[in-house]
Image: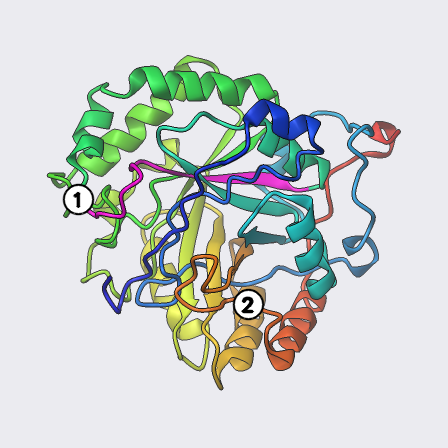
Amino acid sequence: MNALTPRTRRRSFLACAWAGALLLSLTACSSAGGEENVRGLGTAPKSPPPKSSAPNATAPLPEPTARTRTLSKADYLHPDGLYFGLATFHAPARATTASATRAAGRHPRILEYYQGWDEPFSAANAELSYQQGALPLVTWEPFGDSRDRNQPRYALKRIATGSYDAYVIRFARQVKATGQPIVLRLAHEMNGDWYPWSERNSGNRPGDYVKAWRHVHDLFQAVGATEVIWVWSPNVPRGTGGTALRPLYPGDDYVDWIGLDGYGFGERTATEVLQPALDTITRFTGKPILLTETGSSPGPHQAGWTADLFRWIKRTPNVIGFIWFQHSEDEGGQYDYRFDIDPRTKAAFRQGLDSLHLRDWPVTPEDSP
């Protein structure tokens, strides 16, 4: 593990059966997936919390039987407020969502969890997210059980040339069958060197990442899985060895949102972590930006860093929200990133949320039971 790179992504080997999870209140099964990048070293996940409309932010969760109408991708792409999202260790389990919601004083509208490459898509987890009034964001990681950064079996060229087509098509059809939008974050933090899908690892070559991304995207389109919100999610430049981002970008026709991962590792402000990446990205695309992983390591600057995160979001155009990486070290974080472990940080987090206009769950009156 490089001291300048977030590593150790928690890879959840879903211990519960997909079908059984739904019958058991869908609370035990969580795709807490992925091999969590040791968040907090070098390249860091995303950051800020969006503004929130206080009156509705703490509204009760929809009952599982009180289904609202199925919305389309277009209903979510350009929100009228900022998304507040959470990535908890057992997401999208109700208990962890409820615990973090109580601490934040606001309800998350995106729940992020991790999905291994050879695992089937979990409709149960997506449904559970929706039942809690949150859009599911699935981080899909093309590697095996090993933590080795070199895994030629999952080389980008193999994905791009069809070796995994049967799996990808099956996955896409499972996504389509949900009949609901899914946010898909494929092969994130590709500009670092800590994952097998880096162009520096697994025998990959320059240009392979874009080819693999486009191929997977095209297979989804071919089977009619068009309600996917595609998120291209690099890491902030720190710890990436100066890897250029533009050559890794699949293009506006293949991406809906830009995801950015950025953590505080002792810096005084979130601005100094996030702004350099934003300045680079906005030179080649104007797509909406969602901080897909963010948090700050514990220490004397954590509360100030967190407060600045919200200020940065408020003054930065085109940012549509953030997802806080609510994991402890035991749960895969490089550090304990939970915003509620320090009273000062928790206060800064809650005050920051109160200062933002957060997006409500998009349900119309005629859809209510």
Which residue type does callout 2 highlight? Arg
**Left or right: where 10 falls relative to 72:** left
Q: Nearer the viewer, mark 1 or mark 2?
A: 1
**Magenta part of the chain:** 134-149
Residue 334 percent location from the top left of the image: 39, 65
The answer to which quarter of the image holds residue 351 is bottom right
Residue placed under numbered mark 2 in the picture: 315
Q: Tag 1's secondary structure?
A: loop
Category of crowding for the residue at label 2, using alpha-carbon neighbours closer than 10 angstroms: few (below 14), some (14–19), many (at least 20): few
Nearer the observer, 266 or 102: 102
Residue located at (30% from left, 17% from top): 165
Quarter holding the N terminus? Answer: bottom left
Q: Is residue 254 above or below residue 292?
A: above
Category of crowding for the residue at label 1, using alpha-carbon neighbours closer than 10 angstroms: few (below 14), some (14–19), many (at least 20): many
Quarter holding the C terminus? Answer: top right
Image coloring type = rainbow
Residue located at (53% from left, 28% from top): 122
Residue located at (81% from left, 36% from top): 63
The answer to which quarter of the image holds residue 311 is bottom right
Q: Is residue 236 above or below residue 114?
A: below
Whether residue 72 is visible to the viewer of this picture, yes or no, is: no
Which residue type does callout 1 highlight? Asn
Residue 224 percent location from the top left of the image: 48, 15
Residue 292 percent location from the top left of the image: 47, 52
Residue placed under numbered mark 1 in the picture: 150
Residue 346 percent location from the top left of the image: 64, 73
Task: Decide whether residue 45 is among the magenta residues.
Answer: no
Q: Tag 2's secondary structure?
A: helix
